[in-house]
Amino acid sequence: MRRPYIKKYSIVLTAATLVFTLTGCSGAGPNAATRLIKQVTDGAEAAITTDGNDLSISNLLLVATPDGSAVLIGTIVNRTETPDALLGISAGGTTAEITGEQNLLQNAPIRFEGEQATSKAVFDGVGAEAGRNVTISLAFARAGVVTKNVIIRDQRDDYKEITK
């Protein structure tokens, strides 16, 4: 007595089992690990939304130069009609030398480095070492001070053109 249908059923059962085990994992849905990622770049993010302020700070990081100095990378946007101004930036007890735009008008970003850069901030001789983190503080005329922990990157790949 032959049972040719057993082979067909076992193939279908194996395929169905594989489909349910491979697609039924907890990697999908509102709590998926990849969906909960909040930072997708090396740069730190911050926002000041108190007392009528609405400043967005994005992609903040430092790039170490061969002489131990560090150059700030990042973008600051004022989303309110009331102007603000960047008063200063400090990291590791050192104040940055800022050149370029420091006034924050509505939706007119201050960009540090890149093709559309409007400003430059350099920390001379701070002994910046790539791979380390440093606390950086940005002081604004209206919005106050925001402090973030940022990474120091080396001068290669996307940052190879960054100079003092």
Image (cartoon, grey):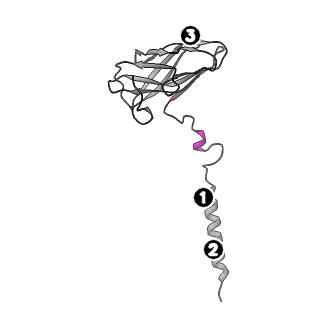
**Badge 1 or badge 3: first in the primary sequence:** 1
Dot 1: element: helix
Q: Residue 92, how many percent across, how many down? A: 40, 19
Disc 3 designates what residue?
Answer: 141
Residue, far left = 67
- When asked about the image quadrant of residue 131, the answer is top left
Image coords of residue 156 (percent x, y) = 39, 34
- Amino acid identity at mark 2: Ser
CA gap between label 3 and label 2 equals 73 Å
Q: Is residue 91 magenta?
A: no
Label 1 close to label 2 by CB (< 8 Å): no
Q: Determine which residue is flagged by label 1.
A: 22
> Can residue 108 be seen in this snapshot?
yes
Q: Position of residue 139 (x, y in %)?
A: 52, 14
Q: Residues within 10 Å of mark 1 (few under 14, many from 20)?
A: few
Q: Tell me how far mark 1 sits from mark 3, CA to CA.
A: 55 Å
Q: Which residue is mark 2?
A: 10
